[in-house]
Image: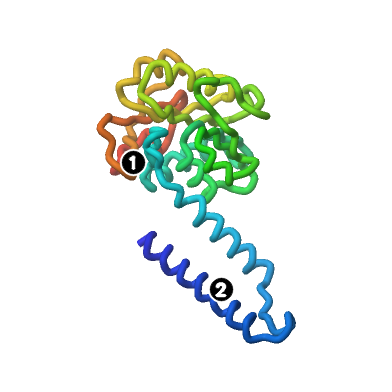
C-alpha cells in the first residue's frame, strides 16, 4: 500500500511538472508561465529531497544493512518518546533510522546522523562524518549533549562495539538504544549497562546472525513483541 501511494505521488508530481514545462515552452514571456504558490514549491522540494535520500542503497562493503520500514518506525517512535518534543537524538551508524525520524519528528526535535558513508552528507548540517576507529573525533558535538543515542555498530566484533561504546558514552546524557547481534549481549551490558528488549528488529534483507535491540531505560515499544508492536 505504501509503495502504491508513493508511485501515485510520483506520477502526480511528474504530471504537474510536465504541465509547467508545456506552458513554459508555449508562452512568449514569463507572464505566460503559471506560478507555483510558495506552499506548492515547498512541497515539491520536500518530495524530491526525500526521493533522493530515501533511495540510497546499501553498500555491503561498508557492512550496511538497512532496517525494514516497520523496524525503523518502531525505533524512531521509541527514540522520539524518550527524547521528548524538544529533545536531541543522535543516530550512530544507523541512517535508515535517521531517515525515518525526519518523517516523524516534530520541528522542535533535533536529530544528527553520525555516519562513515559520505553519500549521507546530503543531510548537510545534520551529517557528521564518523569513523568508529577514532570514536571521539566528533566534529562540533559536545559531551553529554544528546537525550537519546541510538547506535548500530557496523561489525559484530568486540573491538567495534568497544569503540562505538566510547562514542555513545561521550554523546549521551541519559538514554541509550543499541542495535546489534544477540551474541554481543554480555559485552553490551558490561560497556553500556543495557538490557535486551523483547522487540526483535528486522532488516530489508535477511541477516545470518540473530539481531536484537538493547536499552538502558524502561522502553515502551521495544518492550513489546513483534506482533504487539
In the rendered image of this protein, does residue 23 appear above or below residue 78?
below
Q: Position of residue 66 (x, y in %)?
A: 39, 41
Q: Position of residue 93 (x, y in %)?
A: 48, 33
Q: Quadrant of the C terminus?
A: top left
Nearest the viewer among 32 and 144 is 32
Q: Quadrant of residue 228?
A: top left
Q: Position of residue 11 (x, y in %)?
A: 45, 71
Gap in angstroms between the C-alphas marked 2 and 1: 35 Å
Asked if labels 1 and 2 touch by Cβ distance under 8 angstroms, the answer is no
Q: Secondary structure at mark 2?
A: helix
Name the residue rendered at 52%, 70% in the picture: 13
Nearest the viewer among 14 and 24 is 24
Can you identify the residue that label 1 sits on? 203
The tag earlier along the polypeptide, 2 or 1, is 2
In the rendered image of this protein, does residue 117 appear above or below residue 30?
above
Q: Quadrant of the N terminus?
A: bottom left
Mark 1 is surrounded, within 10 Å at the Cα level, by few (under 14), some (14 to 19) or many (20 or more) other residues, namely some
The residue at the far top in this view is 190
Nearest the viewer among 109 and 5 is 5
In the rendered image of this protein, does residue 26 appear above or below residue 132?
below
Can you identify the residue that label 2 sits on? 17
Left/right placement of residue 227 relative to residue 16 reads left
Amino acid at each position: 500500500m505504501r509503495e502504491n501511494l508513493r508511485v501515485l505521488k510520483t506520477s502526480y508530481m511528474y504530471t504537474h511538472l510536465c504541465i509547467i514545462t508545456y506552458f513554459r515552452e508555449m508562452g512568449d514571456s514569463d507572464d505566460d508561465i503559471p506560478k507555483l504558490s510558495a506552499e506548492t514549491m515547498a512541497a515539491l522540494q520536500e518530495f524530491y529531497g526525500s526521493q533522493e535520500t530515501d533511495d540510497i542503497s546499501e553498500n555491503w562493503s561498508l557492512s550496511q544493512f538497512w532496517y525494514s520500514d516497520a523496524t525503523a518506525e518502531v525505533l524512531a517512535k521509541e527514540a522520539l518518546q524518550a527524547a521528548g518534543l524538544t529533545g536531541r537524538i543522535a543516530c550512530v551508524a544507523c541512517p535508515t533510522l535517521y531517515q525515518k525520524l525526519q518523517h516523524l519528528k516534530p520541528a522542535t526535535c533535533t536529530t544528527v546522523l553520525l555516519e562513515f558513508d559520505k553519500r549521507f552528507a546530503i543531510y548537510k548540517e545534520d551529517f557528521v562524518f564518523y569513523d568508529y576507529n577514532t570514536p571521539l573525533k566528533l566534529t562540533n558535538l559536545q559531551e553529554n549533549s544528546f537525550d537519546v543515542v541510538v547506535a548500530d555498530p557496523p561489525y559484530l566484533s568486540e573491538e567495534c562495539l568497544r569503540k562505538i561504546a566510547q562514542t555513545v558514552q561521550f554523546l549521551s546524557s541519559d538514554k541509550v538504544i543499541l542495535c546489534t547481534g544477540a551474541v554481543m549481549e554480555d559485552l553490551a551490558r558490561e560497556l553500556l549497562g543495557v538490557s535486551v528488549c523483547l522487540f526483535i528488529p528486522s532488516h530489508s534483507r535477511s541477516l545470518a546472525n540473530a539481531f536484537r535491540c538493547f536499552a538502558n531505560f524502561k522502553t515502551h515499544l521495544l518492550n513489546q513483541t513483534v506482533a504487539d508492536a
